[in-house]
Amino acid sequence: MFQPASRIANIASPATIAMAARARELKAEGKDIISLALGQPDFASPPQALEGAIEEVRAGHTGYPPIPGQKSLLEAVAHKFKRDNELDVSLSQLMVANGGKQIIFNAFMASIEQGDEVIVPSPYWVSYPLIAQMFGGKAVHVPCYEHNNFRLDPADLAKAITPKTRWIVLNFPNNPTGAILEKSDLEAIAEVIRKAPHVLVMSDEIYEHLTFDGKKHLSLAQVAPDLMDRILIVNGVSKAYAMTGWRVGFAAGPEKLIKAMIKVQGNVSSGICTLAQGGACAALNGNLTEVEAMRNVYEKRRNRAVEFLRAIDGVSCAMPQGAFYAYPGFAAIMNKRTASGRLVTNDVELAEALLEEQHLATVPGSAFGLGPHLRLSFAASEQQLSEAYERLKRFVESFS
Ligand code: GLU
């Protein structure tokens, strides 16, 4: 009888993926499901990305690629860091992997010893603590508060650092709250990091192009270039270019760390699909016109989402400043009953009831470290979003 290894026996599957899979199953059964569970852009990938992939096939690039990535893609990534973040990185400081997730996996596997602490400000994307735990790491959460627009307070961060801290994970624009960090926040955080020379920083900037209200993303490395030898920047083409299925993530970091990460990947999966590399290369070498057009649409959807959610009695909603998720709170309807008499005491039960009673899939906030919230992606068509919000309103208003 199979028993999972202790290394993973107590590790949960990511709630984002679990909810999306559940929605897919119910849809296959013929149920009229709307899923706002996954951060999955509803746009097509840019035409130049498609061409780039086809070009790889035509050129006969169908053999094993180099493990860190094809030179042409690494050059495109270096160009991206220069263009978007004013950073000069050499190719030996870069690698590509199967999505940002594998970059995180590589980095944690390459660096975490049993009992090491990984500071993950909360709310957080589900996978940072889960991947850290796979390698014996212990997630230490630093709460970011709604009244502070979910920004990370540098003083709270400083208090969480111990001699056992191995990593600090920063993810701004944030999934799930949409919080961003201003230059002054980054400067104060850099000061904290300077005082802890044993700590590495993972800065996940996958949503960098999706910021609203005229705000522009700043990378920690841009504000504190002196810390570049301890910062690993995680990024990828998934969110900005609507290329989630291509699975192309990349990282820039200290050469020694990147080398160790390449060793991990060489033992796990080798270099990533050449077609995907060609597509990502073309996307990164293109201009940001399509990205900006999508960003504009997301901003309009964000405005509508927040306006709609705030108008529902019993729902509170902060204004996301980036990414494409709304993160409404439902404290006012906890310990009440749905129209069918079902008692809801937390956000997991809330998400379940919403899925079963209104066929709307979301992710419970507790999976991201803060309930009773739900995460609703607004990377979905306007028509789906309108119908989803109507369902949510009907559902919440039925509580008594
Ligand atoms: N980042 C996406 C999300 O949060 C994808 C989910 C995942 O890969 O776990 O929905």
Image: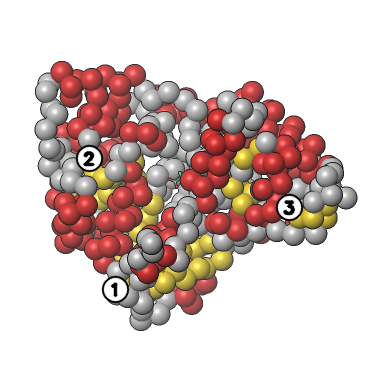
In the shown orientation, is residue 47 left or right of residue 318?
left
Disc sitting over residue 330 in the figure: 3
Q: Quadrant of residue 324?
A: top right
Q: Residue furthest bottom?
A: 163
Please tell me which of labels 3 and 2 falls first in the chain. Answer: 2
Depth order, front residue of 163/107: 107
Q: Quadrant of residue 306?
A: top right
Q: CA distance from mark 3 to mark 2?
A: 42 Å
- Residue 145 place in picture, x, y as percent: 61, 61
Residue at position x 52%, y 68% in the image: 142
Foreground label between 3 and 2: 2
- Disc 1 marks which residue? 113
Question: Callout 1: helix, strand or loop?
Answer: loop
Please tell me which of labels 3 and 1 falls first in the chain. Answer: 1
Which amino acid, mark 2? Answer: Ile
Quadrant into which the N terminus falls: bottom left
Residue at position x 69%, y 41% in the image: 356
- Residue 363 place in picture, x, y as percent: 59, 48
Which amino acid, mark 1? Answer: Glu
Which amino acid, mark 3? Answer: Phe
Colour theme: secondary structure
Q: CA distance from mark 2 to mark 1?
A: 27 Å
- Residue 209 place in picture, x, y as percent: 43, 38
- Disc 2 marks which residue? 272
